Image: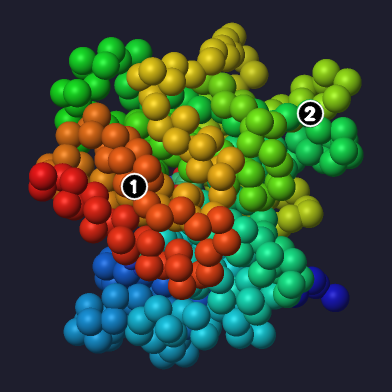
Amino acid sequence: MPESPQRIAILGATGSIGGSALEVIAASLGRLQAVGLTAHSRLAELVEQAKHFRPAWIVGTDETASRAFDWAGIPPACVVKQGMDAVIDAVASPDVDVVLAAIVGSAGLHATWAALAAGKTVALANKETLVMAGGLVTALARRTGATIVPVDSEHSAVWQALQAGRRAEVRRIVLTASGGPFLRHSCEQLSNVTVEEALAHPTWTMGRKITVDSATMMNKALEIIEARWLFDLDVDQIGVVIHPQSLIHGLVEFVDGSIVAQMSCPDMRLPIQYALNYPERREQVSTPFDWSRATSLTLEPPDEERFPALRLGREAARVGGTAGAVLNAANEAAVAGFLEGELRFNEIVPACERVLGHHDFDPNPTLDDLIRLDRWAREEVVRWACA
Ligand code: NDP
Ligand code: MG
């Protein structure tokens, strides 16, 4: 009997990760099936995806836009739903095996939470969920037996490398960072960079928010917090190294000094494919490595004077509690402000630091506390920007 396909719900199907995931599904020879897709603003693109992939349901998460949209053209068997509550219902359905959480920002939290509460396997690209509520999210997964599989390339790499030894044999993990477009910029140069320059990443093509995060290195700060929760490590066991070629994605150093690294061309289709097929490896869908060319790999420590976001990430990972949610929300608001021309590039991290330093820290928050603080931190950034 042919094996039945893994039925995948893609939250954020119209994004960079969502699009790559659909390419992985298209190349899977029927082993993977898209049963549900969501989009927020790009509804015409969602219709095209529905025509091609024939999911059972699609959701326009911006309820007002979705109700106003003309959905003519979607296949007759495809059910159209509106709003985040519809996603929360749909991910818990018995017809879904794996939920790919690829909505950007804290907007992805509720649907990811619902999938974990229903005991699903969650392929997690939406790192902000773990940054915001890692303690509660991992406890929920333990309670329901849900599995969180990393999609973020560094965490996928570490996860793969961890398979070379036992948990107690791990000394540290190291996340690589390309350094982004401003790796060699002076502090003065960093004060004058434009939105266009910040969006021109040297090695990865991604959504706008994570591309700006890569340029400030806040992305790596968020990834430290993500790794702390995913792998249950002490923050001092999580290192960061600059690797501009983006070929090594993550490393694990074991107690005997052995370092095991995962390498591949910078192409998100590989970690997505691994997450959706885990524990199987499938035929390559991603860019092949060119073994005929001489290749240099360089590793260097990050400069935290010019990129202070890393320090904030480590601090938030160390203290836990409400710090991750506040840092994440402040960063989302500051990045939005930068993209809209209201904040300068080199004000993003100071805005986050200020809001983090001024918040009412709680070591044991509830989910409602975190959601309230998320809102507060965004308002604080706007106040700070207008002051
Ligand atoms: P994109 O901006 O390309 O896509 C975001 C997706 O989320 C889109 O489908 C968008 O819908 C949807 N969306 C946006 N706002 C909302 C909202 N308020 N409610 C519901 N859905 C919404 O982002 P990426 O694909 O780059 O990133 C997605 C996640 O994956 C992020 O958490 C990022 O950190 C993580 N990630 C991304 C990587 C990458 O290579 N891109 C690498 C590692 C992690 P629409 O477009 O229709 O408005
Ligand atoms: Mg990453």
Q: Are marks 1 and 2 in contact (CB under 8 Å)?
A: no
Tell whether 10 sits left or right of 249. left
The amino acid marked with disc number 1 is His
Earlier residue among tags 1 and 2: 2
Rendered location of residue 387, percent (x, y): 10, 45
Residue 234 disc label: none
Mark 2 falls on what kind of element? Answer: strand
Quarter placement of the N terminus: bottom right
| Residue depicted at x 61% and y 64% | 136
Residue under the image location 53 percent in, 64 percent down: 365
Estimate the x, y position of residue 226 in percent, counting from the top left. Answer: 57, 47
The image quadrant of residue 182 is: top left
Residue at image x 40%, y 55%?
Answer: 360
Q: Classify mark 1: residues with Cα within 10 Å, few (<14), some (14-19) or many (20+).
A: few
Secondary structure beneath disc 1?
Answer: helix
Residue 77 in view in this figure: yes
Residue 211 visible within the image: no
- Residue 331 position in % (x across, y down): 34, 46
User: Label 1: which residue?
Assistant: 358
- Who is closer to the viewer here, 272 or 234? 234
Most foreground residue, 175 or 381: 381
Residue type indicated by callout 2: Arg
Residue identifier under label 2 = 171
**Other-residue count near label 2 (Cα within 10 Å), few / some / many at <14 / 14–19 / ≥20:** some
Q: Nearer the viewer, residue 12 or 259?
A: 259
Residue 256: which quarter of the image?
Answer: top right
Quote the CA–CA distance across marks 1 and 2.
34 Å
Whether residue 260 is situated above or below residue 384 in the rendered picture = above
Percent position of residue 19, x then y: 44, 56
